[in-house]
Structures are given as C-alpha cells and as structure tokens.
Image (cartoon, coloured by chain):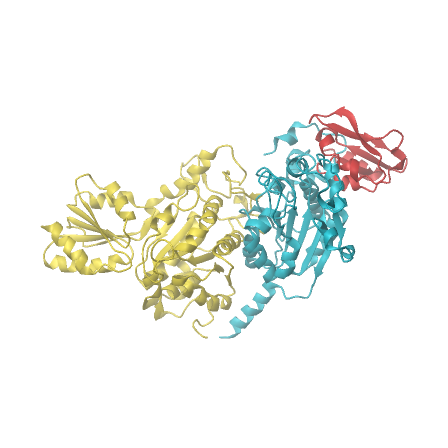
Amino acid sequence: MDNKEKKFKLFLNKNRCGGDQCAICVSVCPTGILEIGDELNMRVAYIPRVKEGKAKYCTSCRRCEFGCPEWCIYVLEEEEEKLAEKAKI
Amino acid sequence: MNIGNGKRFLPEGRHLMMGNVAMAEGALSSGLKFFGGYPITPSTEVIEHLAVRLPQVGGICMQMEDELASINSVIGASLVGAKSMTATSGPGLSLMVETISMAANLEVPFVFCDVQRNGPGTGFVTEPHHNDIGLVRFSGNGEFQVIALAPMTCQELFDLTITAFNYAETYRCPVYILSDAYLGHLHEIVNIPPKEEIRKRVIDRELPPPDQFVKKFTYKDDITGEFVIPRPPQMGTDYCPVLFLHQPHNYEGLPTPKPMQFMKAIMDKINKNKDKICITEKYKLDDADIVIIAYGLPVRSSYRAVDIARKENIKVGIFRLVTVWPFPDKQVKEVVKDARAVIVPELNYTGYIAEQVERVTKLGTPVIKIPKVCEFHHPDDILNVIREVAK
Amino acid sequence: MPEIGRMLPNEKPEHPYVIFSYGGSMYKNFATRFCSGCGYGIIGHIFTRLFEDEKLDPHLYPTIIGIGCYSQMLLLVHAKSQKILALHGRAPAVATGIKMANPNMKPIIFSGDGDCLGIGGNHFIHVCRRNLDCVIFIFNNSIYAMTGGQGAPTTLYGATSSTTPYKMFENRSDGVQLALAAGATYVARTTVAHPRTYIKYFKKALNHKGTSVIEVITPCVTYFGRKNLDNLGAEYIGLEGKKMDTGGKMIDWIKRNTVRINQAKFMSEEELFNKYVIGEFRYQPDKPEYSEEYAKIQKIAMKEE
C-alpha cells in the first residue's frame, strides 16, 4: 500500500481485509496514521488506508501486523520483501 | 505387597483369583499401558489391583476426578499409542456414552469393562443385573457398532480380556467385557498359560510399514470390495492424520462430503466380519429339539438343568453366546430352525437377547423368557420350564 | 475444506507466515473463517508465528482444541502440529491421557471461557491440582459465541446477551483465581490488545514445567460488542456509553478496561468492578510435576520385587 525510504514497506492484502467492522489496525496504530478509506474489497468492506502525507510517521512497530486477525496488513523489510517475492507462492 | 512378582505375566499354573483381579491380569498380559478409572462399587478392585501392578510394568494407572475424565484420558492415551482400558459400572457407563460415540467415530481402540449392577438409579449396588445390554449396544449419539463379550467364569474373564484387546486392535471399535457384581467378586481357580503362549495370542500395537502411512481409517477396498481396517494411528509419530476430527471423514481423516460412505465404513466393518468376531458354544445340541440360548452366568445353572433333563430323556441343549454384540444372526437361525421351543434365561426383566432371538426364530416356535433380577437362576427354575415345554 | 482461500486472488508479496498455517499451506492465501474483528484470528496467528519461530517439534507439542468459535483454529494453527478436537469441556482430560501415555509430550490446550470454566470446570480444576505439564489457554470473550451469543460464566455484570436480555445479574467467575486456588504453578492473564505480552507469556509457559494457565481476553464483535455499550467497566464514573460495533472500538474498550496487576493493588474494590486484571499472578517453577512424580512411583514399584 505504501513505501518508505527507511527500507521497509507496509503492505495490505486488500481482499482479505475485514474492513470497517474490524478496523483494529486503525485503533491499534500508535501514531494514528491509518484511517478507513472508501475503497470496497471483495468482502464488501471499506478497507483502511494511510492518511494523506502521514506515511513518514510510520515507525514499523508492527502493532498492526500483530493485531490483524486476517494477516492482511504487514511490514516487509527490503530483504524480507525480496525473500517473499522470490518465494512467489 | 507382592501380589504380582513385578513382571507383566503371572507365573504359569493355577491361581485362586477374584473375577475383577483376573480381568485386570488378563489386561496386563495383553499389553495394557494406561488405565484411567474412577472407583464405583462393583469394579473398584480392578483399579485397586492395577494401581499396584501397572507401575511395576512401566504402565500408568490413574484415578481421575470423574468417569468423564477417565474415559477421555483413555481416549487420549490410546491415540498416542498406549493400549488403554477403563472399568466402571452402570452409572459410570451412562456418564461415558458421549465420549464412546466420539471414540467410535475416531475409531480409537480401547477396552471397556462394565461390571453391571442392579437396576435404574443406584439400585442394589452389590447385586448382579444384566441391564446394560441395551445401553452397551445403543449407547451414545449416532449409530456405531460395538463388540461385547460375556464371560461366565474367572478363567474366561482372563482369556476373554485378551480376546477383547485383540478385537480392539483389529476392529478399532469400542469393545466391552460384560461381567457383573457376582462374577466380579467371585473367587475361582484360574489356569495361567505359559508366557510364550500368551505372547503369541496378543496383537501388539505397532506402526504399519512407512509406505502404508496414507490410509489411517477404515476404507472400502474397491478391488476386493471388503473393508480394510488399517493399524490405529498414533500421535507423536508420522503415522498421524492431520487432525483428529470426529466428523464423517475419509480414510485420511479429512472431512468428507459423503457421510454415507463413512457410515458404511464404521458399521460394515463389523457387520461384514460377523463370522470372524462371533464366538459361540454348543452343549448337547445335536439332537436337541428344545434349545436354551443364554450368555453369562445363567449358562452355568442351565448346564445342570440340561444334565438332569437329559436323564429324564428330554432332548434339550444349550447354545451359548460368548459375543453378545454383534448378535450372531446366522448361527442362531440354524440352531433354532427346527427347534420345538426356545428358552432364554436372562438376568434381566425385558430380555434384551430374548427379543433378538424372537426376531430370528420362525413364527411358530415359542420363545420363553425366564427373567431373574438380582438373583441367580436356580437350576430348578430352568428345569420346571423345560418339563412344562416337554409335555 | 476452506473455499474462501481459493476464492480470493493472491496479492503480490504474501504475508510470510501464511504458508505455515494449515489452511494457508493448502491454498497459499487463507482467510480465517472468524467474523471480521474477532480476536481469535490474532491468537491463531501468534500461535502459528511462535510455532514457527520457536521451531517446536510437532511430535512433542500436540494441540488439543475444545469446542467453540476457536475450533476453527484447526485450520489456522500450524500445518505440521498434530491437532485433536476434544469434546466440549473435555480437552484437559484428553490432555491428561496424552501426556501420561507419552511423558515427553507437552499438550497445548485451547479452550474458551464456557468450555473451561463452564462445562469443563471439573477437569480444569483437577489438571491444575495435579500440576500436569501442559499449557491451558482460556479464551475469554465472555460470551458463548459459537452458539449465538449466550451468557457465559464470565459475562460481565450488566452486559446483555441472548440469554440475559435484560441484564447479566449473576456474579462472574474468574479463571485466574480458579487456577490459583486449584494450584496451577504458572498463571497469567493477558489480552489480545497486548500481543507482545501474550507472546512473552506463551514462551515462558512453553519452558515452564507444570500446568501453565493463560487467560486471554478476546473481543467478540458480532455478539458481545454490538449488544453492549462501552461503559461496561466504568459504572462508577457514570459514563454514557456508545455501542462497540467494530473491532477497533472493542480493542479500545479492552485497553480501557484492563488494569495491570501492580496497579490493581492500589485501586479500590469499586474501581476494580468489571475490570480485567492482567499480568503474571503466580510463577513457581520448582513445584513437582505430575508425570515426573509418577515416574518415581514406577521406580519404587519396580524395585519392590
């Protein structure tokens, strides 16, 4: 969903996300950079997105990753992301 | 206390033993490893004896907090590959039926000793009453088949326990030993065979060769058409299904959209092997036109009655059922085909097996029940009925 | 088996741990079957993540799962772990049999508040009394969620559920105090809103010899959140509550409603009403463990020829 010059990226698996009824990542994020967007996914739910221009405040603390019940939102380091790309499942 | 000599097999020869103790020793010689039980009046001697003997042979004897926990720990232990058994009486069995129906679904091999006692509710606690026959067959939710053996002497309590463990290993279904309060507390001479002989008879619990690790539950072999029952799976090894789920599953343990196929597997693995499972005995039956069908202790008094009746040259014989369930329809039908009358002495009032016999006999031949509750059939009771019928 | 995994298209780089979960190992892209916002998904993932990071030997750590919403975790838990679905409430009893038959196993028991403190209370008490080497999780969503949101032994006072439509009037039972009284040697409570402490307690329980009981407070949005206001724990302030109809609101409510164990000492009885006290309540690693004691008994019995 978004990338940063600090060598990590925040990814969201759009279609698996529980959306507005879940919104755990929105409330768990310490810097509050996430919000519920207006894009619908295959589960007919409004999925979260990063607020305007707040991308740089993300500190990759992974609270959203640990708090997400559907394994949708996750932070991948550069090497990890290559690893995930290589292991293209 | 030096009841056993610390070894798994008792020294060969004659021993004076209580029924419950004989059954416990039978279980020990057939490789018992885990016993989970709860004290209940007629069957406490089993757990008391095993509490002494099982640790001596490296086994585990646990007195759990209630019957539910004891049957569940038996299922857990049996899933890990330990031969396990529990012993209880009527009220305990009625607590355990839910778990037995789960065990039948997971095809867990275990042996269940039901020392029956009197009546609904608490009843006369030390009086025998074969009232669990129906509960044993139709216990638990859902349909499944069970094997129930009915010994009548302490010697048979020892031998039939080994057969029960072998049946549990091969057919992987709940196997019951139906003794009762008198038989459990009866002291009789038991001839213990030599160790090698017992070891030859016992089927051990071991894993199949690695190439047969895929099929873990009963399945119908398409080529030969009959049911193949693989070795029981063991947790903690590679021969273990991905998940033990008590829902209709295929031979690999995964839920299946065809429950009828699963139902056939559980039911027909016993129905199709009835002739291999059923043990019956005949006594002076070849020229008899009056047939006595019985199981358990009433058989002993009917032996005496038949001997006296034979002296009065009444042609009567006994057809004894050692395996009460599954009911041997074919054999009983042959025996009863040309019988003038059938007498069924049973130690209960409704006559569970008498009804099964009526189902099998022709319309004409009368089936006479001799119900007795809490006491034994005196040979004269059976003799008077034989004399009436013979007139 | 789960069709939902195959239905959803696969995103670019997948979450690294999805492949290890049982459903994920089959469909490469597995969505849990829990309602969105439920806490069980978080617990299942953390279990799979730990199972993978700690390199637990699947032969030695069987998972025994009771009956409840978390029975869906059969699909979410690690693919190679050996799982058995026990009857409702009987998971601790099955674990006793498994542990005693193979003493170097350490069963991990998933059970819920109704499953462990309701129908399976007797088995739970006696497993703690014996100090059997196992890990018992009590997932406390204070509701019988699978059967439609009925009241549970741990439903908070004043909460509404489908069987307590007016108000939950009963006193609620506390899994941690019950475990302490029964004699478990490692007792802790944490919530899903604090996943790091959950991981810490879980690792500590894995290396602890004896019964470790971890109660985890999880939100149940569809049956508990939608029916209750979020002033449940704050009666003494007299706050006017709003409905907790999303996972985020329930996580906030849990955070507001939990009190650390050290802070709870200074709070009055009235303030602690309907609150969850989290932290480690007891840790006694040197208490005798049941299967080792029984091994000693076996030695004594074998010597006494």
Pick the residue in front: B76 or A42. A42
Pinpoint residue B9: horizontal percent, then vertical percent: 43, 66
Tally the numbered discs: 0
Which color was chain B given?
Answer: yellow
Residue at 77% x, 24% y: name it. Answer: A39
Pinpoint residue B55: horizontal percent, then vertical percent: 51, 67
Quadrant assignment, res B13: bottom left
Quadrant assignment, res B124: bottom left
* Residue A44 in view of the camera: yes
Q: Which chain is cyan?
A: C
* Residue C54 in view of the camera: no
Q: Which chain is red?
A: A
Residue at 43% x, 35% y: name it. Answer: B223
Image height of B5 relative to A19, above or below? below
Residue at 59% x, 63% y: name it. Answer: C290
**Would you say C217 lies left or right of B281 here?**
right
**Would you say C299 lies left or right of B369 here?**
right
Pinpoint residue C70: horizontal percent, then vertical percent: 62, 42
**Would you say B10 lies left or right of B241 here?**
left
Image height of B253 relative to C287, above or below? above
**Would you say C256 lies left or right of B252 here?**
right
Pick the residue in front: B73 or B60. B73
Image height of A16 relative to B385, above or below? above
In the rendered image, the quadrant that contains the N terminus of chain C is top right
